[in-house]
Image: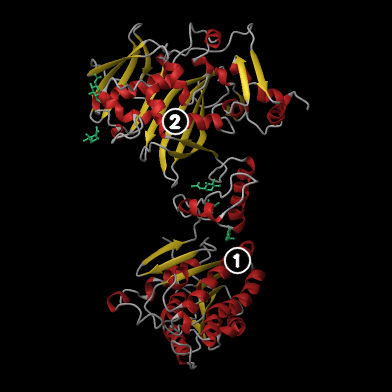
Amino acid sequence: MKELRFDGRVVVITGAGAGLGKTYALLFASKGAKVVVNDLGGGRHGEGKSSKAADDVVAEIKRNGGIAVADYNSVVEGEKIIKTALDNFGRIDVLVNNAGILRDKSFPRISNLDWDLIQDVHLKGSFKTTQTAFTLFKKQGYGRIIMTTSTSGLYGNFGQANYSAAKLGLVGLSNTIAIEGAKYNIHCNCITPTAASRLTEDIIPPDIFNELKPEFIAPVVAYLCHESCEENGSIIESGAGWAGKCHLIRSNGALLRSNMADAVTIEKVQENWSKITNMENAQHFNKSSEATMFLVSALESIREGTKTSSNNDDVNIVDYTEKDVILYALGVGASLANESDLQFLYENHENFSALPTYFVCPALTAIYMSRNSGITNIPGKEISLEKVLHGEQYLEILGSMKTSGRLTTKVEVVEVLDKGSGALIVTNVDSYDEEGNLVVRNQLATFAIGAGNFGGPRIGSKLVSCVTKPTRSPDMALSYKTAVDQAALYRLSGDFNPLHIDPNLAALGGFEKPILHGLCSLGISVRLVLMAYAGSDASLFKALKARFVKPVLPGQTLTVNMWRDGNRILFETFVAETNVIVISAMDLKSATVHEGAPKDTKPQTTLTISDADFIDLATGKLNAQTAFMKGKLKVAGNIMLAQKLGPLLKSEAKL
Ligand SMILES: *[C@@H]1O[C@H](CO)[C@@H](O)[C@H](O)[C@H]1NC(C)=O
Ligand SMILES: *[C@@H]1O[C@H](CO)[C@@H](O)[C@H](O)[C@H]1NC(C)=O
Ligand SMILES: *[C@@H]1O[C@H](CO)[C@@H](O)[C@H](O)[C@H]1NC(C)=O
Ligand SMILES: *[C@@H]1O[C@H](CO)[C@@H](O)[C@H](O)[C@H]1NC(C)=O
Ligand SMILES: *[C@@H]1O[C@H](CO)[C@@H](O)[C@H](O)[C@H]1NC(C)=O
């Protein structure tokens, strides 16, 4: 490794008569720098004055063959210290603001004099030296500045109020100098040393004190001052042979009003406090403008009336209650016919719990609510919903499955694969609880017929893969005869696609009658797997991955073949009456995809909507899907055609 040297560089170090400052001076000098050793020669409390301390250090440097000059000025007259550098060496490249004094008293006992003295030496002193040096740095297009801050400033320390204030003041000073200096190659960083020095000797226990050698910190400071170091505007903590970067982070926070008309109240602040102070996923901002931009996007969310977690992602809030959980359980065939299902159907049951597959519902609802409509809005691609088939589903439970609550759900299209005959769209839907913990992760793979051949990748990396079933015969099989009303019941859990209830629409899609929701068949299958292997204990569920192959008609019997592989159960579901596999773990190549596009001769669609809502729709304030879900938009006939309304209004309607 190349030795890092400072040949030809002039380094000014304040407070270099002892301790850290002295160690810095010796190190820089040994690496070829010409050093200005500044020291007032005061005691640790800043009293008195003598030239001995600085002189001794200069003598030591010279003995070692280095170049140095002493300076005895107070940092309060920092310009004089810089002048010493110019007078003796003709330039300055590095300024290490190290001088400091300590005067411990509890906060109420701080006198004005104590305050002023501390602020003068630490804050004003660093200001004076740095301002003078900065002007020279700017002219020469190069400079390195170190401010010495303190853990007392960063974290607070009893009895050091004035010192803490001054020390954190230096961080603010450094932050701004870093910004103003960036374009002149002037870097300014803070060091937070924990060193044994005359400033700390009776604060730290002796055994630790002995390991806090300034020699362990000086190389960190020297590196920050080297021309090869890019660091700028940072705080580096160091001591005992360790160094680490320290910075401020901010939580994602909470929106305190959900639309422009909302008031922010003290009670809302209280209610949202845990979210405001939840530091998970907290972020560091490099610039105040970055921090402010974040607020702008939060305001954007308030404008949109969407209560989002205030970032740019597509975020939706889904509230659910015990009733939703029970309705879902009924929808996938939980029944009092089996005593152990009571826990899914009765909110006062000792073990009342949600079936794990319930948690696909918030994901689906979020996609419907989603501003970008998630699966149909692919950049550069027009995809209409009637051409989209739900191909695969992944569900993973990461947190506790509460039986009611609020899930903040983020929809993100992570990958669009070109499968030739169509596009495979991979959408991740992550749901977070009110504390901001990720509790459920869904991944939907949808196949958009006819949207392929766009030159995209065939194989991706984001899609969770299916497992191939074992070749042996199943270890276990359970069956469930679906009810004629299965889809009618299941749809109440949030998937209102009329394909599952409307005979005309089903016929248009080429089905003899309305088909069962794929996710309903999946929910039934998983319920049977839990029954077979987990005593119906939902908490034993971790994750599932399934592929939808063929539709199921309500009334048909589903048989689930299961194979146990350690703690993992592989399953395949087929219709007993026809022996056709409907949910599989086979490779996609062998799966048949049914094209559900309406036949083109038949009409059509009747829309009923109020004038006001129509204008909102046309001007983009209202999303057609949202309008439909909220009952503002009534559709008779082929609802899928209504999906075309949006683009149509955008491109052709002149209102
Ligand atoms: C510090 O300077 C570097 C370039 O030398 C720059 O990229 C960076 O943005 C600066 N830091 C700040 C906080 O301005
Ligand atoms: C948080 O603030 C929102 C307004 O943005 C308010 O509707 C809500 O009741 C508050 N409380 C919680 C727990 O979200
Ligand atoms: C701050 O800068 C770092 C390094 O350039 C970057 O990784 C990070 O994303 C930035 N932070 C923000 C909030 O932009
Ligand atoms: C609830 O679950 C526990 C643990 O599995 C079981 O011991 C208990 O009998 C269950 N309670 C009821 C009412 O089924
Ligand atoms: C009822 O459910 C339990 C597990 O939850 C299962 O072991 C049992 O076989 C089921 N009984 C019937 C009749 O399906």
Q: Residue 414 or 54: which is nearer the viewer?
A: 414
Q: Is residue 594 above or below residue 128?
A: above
What type is the residue that disc 1 sits on? Thr
Q: Are marks 1 and 2 in contact (CB under 8 Å)?
A: no
Q: Residue 472 or 301: which is nearer the viewer?
A: 301
Q: Is residue 388 above or below residue 121?
A: above
Q: Residue 254 or 590: which is nearer the viewer?
A: 254
Residue beneath disc 1:
176
Residue that appears at 33% across and 29% down: 344
Image quarter hosting the C terminus:
top right
Q: Badge 1, how many Cα within 10 Å: few under 14, some, many 20+?
A: some
Q: Residue 144 or 156: which is nearer the viewer?
A: 156
What whole-number distance in Å separates the C-alpha atoms at marks 1 and 2? 44 Å
Q: Quadrant of residue 433?
A: top left
Q: Position of residue 598 (x, y in %)?
A: 58, 11
Would residue 400 be seen by someone viewing this image from the given angle?
Answer: yes
Would residue 16 be seen by someone viewing this image from the given angle?
Answer: no
Q: Is residue 73 above or below residue 259?
A: below
Q: Secondary structure at mark 2?
A: strand
Instruction: Report the disc number at residue 443.
Output: 2
